[in-house]
Amino acid sequence: MKIVMLNGQNHKGSTYHIGRMIANKIEGENEITEFFFPRDLNHFCVGCYQCIESASACPFYDEKRKIIDAIDAADILIVTTPTYCMHMSAPLKSFFDLTFDLWMAHRPMESMFKKKAVIVSTAAGTGIKSATKDVEDCLFYLGVPKIYKYGMAVQAMSWDGVSSDKKEKIENKTAVLARKLSKTTAPSVGIKTRFMFWMMGMMQKKGWNSSPVETQYWKEKGWLDGKKPWK
């Protein structure tokens, strides 16, 4: 399987180590591609809305496209972010901001509705739930139907500082997650995603969208005539 890791930090700390442990434990011959933010995309969305008319019009298209193409081809996404001030890291948030034209409200990628994802976050103490919820919201609106979350209060500033007891718990939990991700069956699309997709389709039909380009995209996909991206 193809696995893409989106890391919300440049350094390889506790969060990265846990994400990589999951990737390494997924069964089969896997191809793992890693991206680090801000190293691989060090830009903020400038709010120009050019991507609404054409994805290639984004001023950061060339850098962004390499990552989007890898995500498009992936079977599994592993998103890691330390908990920064109770939420996901700013560089990771900047990346997701730059993908908003691919959300269900605009021009979602068909492949996203067939992927599984896991979100990993660590903190010295609290904030993990809000950090993983940030990422979960983004993945949901991109269309990912199956999302696992794993957080750990490591009480350490580096992987070396994590206690042996906590590392043992992490080993066991990552093994469980890896087994779930190893299943080759396509994830089922839940009612929440189905309802949101239907709502976005109704918006396109009624012309409540951002651009006629988006409506044309939905028409070409057959989504306004009853077809679904997960079938």
Image (tube, rainbow, N blue to C red):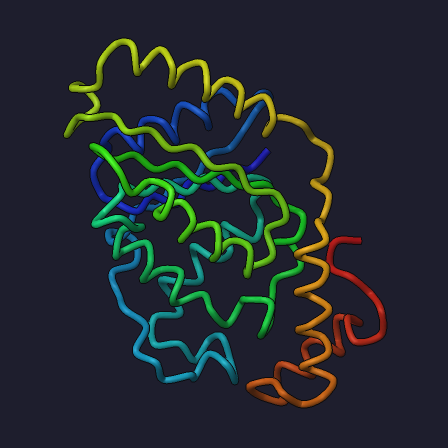
Q: Please, is residue 12 above or below residue 26 in the view?
A: below
Q: Residue at x 40, y 45 (%)?
A: 132
Considering the image in quadrants, where does the N terminus appear? top right
Residue 86, horizontal then vertical, whole percent: 26, 48
Q: Residue at x 66, y 53 (%)?
A: 113
Residue 230, horizontal then vertical, whole percent: 74, 54
Is 218 or 157 nearer to us in this picture? 157
Image quadrant in which you'd find residue 107: bottom right
Is 199 on the left-hand or right-hand side of 122?
right
Q: Please, is residue 153 above or below residue 143 in the view?
A: above
Is 194 or 64 nearer to us in this picture? 194
Q: Please, is residue 139 above or below residue 18 in the view?
A: below
Q: Please, is residue 187 above or below residue 200 in the view?
A: above
Q: Residue at x 42, y 40 (%)?
A: 5
Residue 187, horizontal then vertical, whole percent: 69, 40
Q: Residue furthest front?
A: 126
Image quadrant in which you'd find residue 210: bottom right
Is 73 on the left-hand or right-hand side of 183?
left
Image quadrant in which you'd find residue 111: bottom right
Is 220 on the left-hand or right-hand side of 74?
right
Q: Residue at x 30, y 51 (%)?
A: 87
Residue 64, horizontal then vertical, whole percent: 39, 62
Tally of numbered tags: 0
